[in-house]
Image: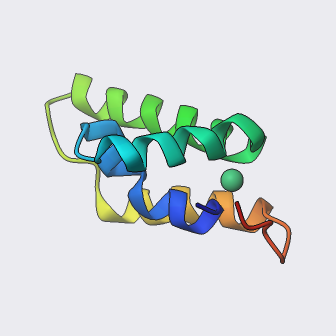
Amino acid sequence: MNCRELTAVILEYLEGEMTPRDVEEFERHLEKCAPCRAYLATYRRTKEMAADVGRIEMPEEMKERLREFLLRRLPRQAPAS
Ligand SMILES: [Zn+2]
């Protein structure tokens, strides 16, 4: 799994909708990738905040913004995992 793949499945991860095999890959990537750990923490916090204010889904726009936030910080050639 690389950084882009991780951002694509982060919601499934937080919702517990990934297969154990995918979770393992996801967490293996996190172990060696600080930007993705930061991204996950930010994503989770934002999601919790959204849940606190009224159990609403995180808006698509916010998801996109978070994704762009991470991708802008990645090296052009993300190392394959
Ligand atoms: Zn990464």
Residue at figure coordinates x 85%, y 68% from the top left: 75
Give the residue at the far front of this rendering: 21
Asked where in the image residue 60 lies, by quadrant, the reply is bottom left
Instruction: Indicate the position of residue 61 as horizontal and vertical percent values.
Output: 38, 65
Looking at this view, name the residue that lies furthest to the top: 52
**Residue 13 appears in which quarter of the rendering?**
top left
* Residue 67 picture location, percent across and down: 54, 62
Query: In this image, 69 relative to 44: left or right?
Result: right
Task: Specify whether 16 is left or right of 33.
Answer: left
Up the image or down, 52 lies above or below 73; here it is: above
Q: Is residue 47 above or below residue 59?
A: above
Residue 45 locus on image (x, y percent): 46, 29
How many numbered marks appear? 0
The image's colour scheme reads rainbow
For the C terminus, the image quarter is bottom right
At 29% across and 56% down in the image, what residue appears?
A: 59
Q: Residue at x 34, y 38 (%)?
A: 14
Question: Image point 28% across, 48% down: which residue?
Answer: 58
Question: Foreground: 40 or 60?
Answer: 40
Quadrant housing the N terminus? bottom right
In the rendered image, the residue lying farthest to the bottom is: 76
Q: Nearer the viewer, residue 81 or 4?
A: 81
Viewer-nearest residue: 17 or 48: 17
Relative placement, left or right, of 66 versus 11 is: right
Report whether 10 appears left or right of 31.
Answer: left
